[in-house]
Amino acid sequence: MTSIPEVGENIPSAAARAIILNRNIEFRPSVKEYTDRQAFVTEVFDKSKDRYNLTFIHPDEKMCGDEYCAVFDEDIPIYFDDDHITRTYALKLSYLFDPIFQEMAHKQELPPRDAHN
């Protein structure tokens, strides 16, 4: 799994401060900031995936649009701090693992069935 976009700000606390102070503050990291920060890791992953037959899950493809990465989902923070997503949002992204688990299930051979069962 590749990295979750890091925000650099405790989203629940910062959002509460913005509401109290009646300010409109931009919390979303830009896609450019995210890709720039992840450039080295992305290069290492790209070199490793073919060599070791790895498959990577990219949560950023769900979390980021063309310009910015989300920090809220339907007005609910998706981060519980500055760079960790909430359990609720992690469950919402869990479908990203489905293709990998399906592939693993197809690759496994089932043991012969016991005639007595």
Image: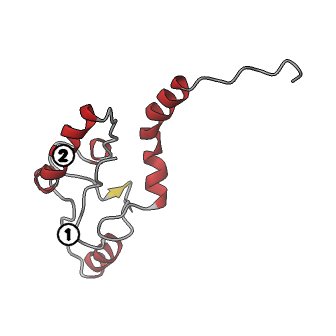
Measured as percent of width and height from the top left, residue 42 is found at: 18, 46
- Could you classify mark 2 by the number of other residues whose Cα lies within 10 Å: few (under 14), some (14-19), or many (20 or more)? few
Measured as percent of width and height from the top left, residue 78 is found at: 38, 60
Left or right of residue 56, residue 93 in this image = right
Q: Is residue 117 above or below residue 27?
A: above
Viewer-nearest of labels 2 and 1? 2
**Mark 1 element type:** loop
Measured as percent of width and height from the top left, residue 41 is found at: 19, 51
Looking at marks 2 and 1 on the same chain, the residue that comes earlier in the sequence is marked by 1
Q: Residue at x 24, y 72 (%)?
A: 9
Measured as percent of width and height from the top left, residue 28 is found at: 21, 60
Front in this rendered view, residue 57 or 41: 41
- Could you classify mark 1 by the number of other residues whose Cα lies within 10 Å: few (under 14), some (14-19), or many (20 or more)? few
Q: Quadrant of the C terminus?
A: top right
State the residue lying farthest toward the top: 115
User: In the rendered structure, which amino acid carries the disc numbered 2?
Assistant: Val
Q: Is residue 62 above or below residue 85?
A: above
**Mark 2 element type:** helix
Q: Is residue 43 above or below residue 83?
A: above
Q: Quadrant of residue 57?
A: top left
- Residue denoted by label 2: 44
Cα–Cα span, label 2 and label 1: 38 Å
User: In the rendered structure, which amino acid carries the disc numbered 1?
Assistant: Asn
Q: Residue at x 27, y 36 (%)?
A: 49
- Residue denoted by label 1: 24
Q: Residue at x 50, y 34 (%)?
A: 101
Q: Residue at x 38, y 54 (%)?
A: 74
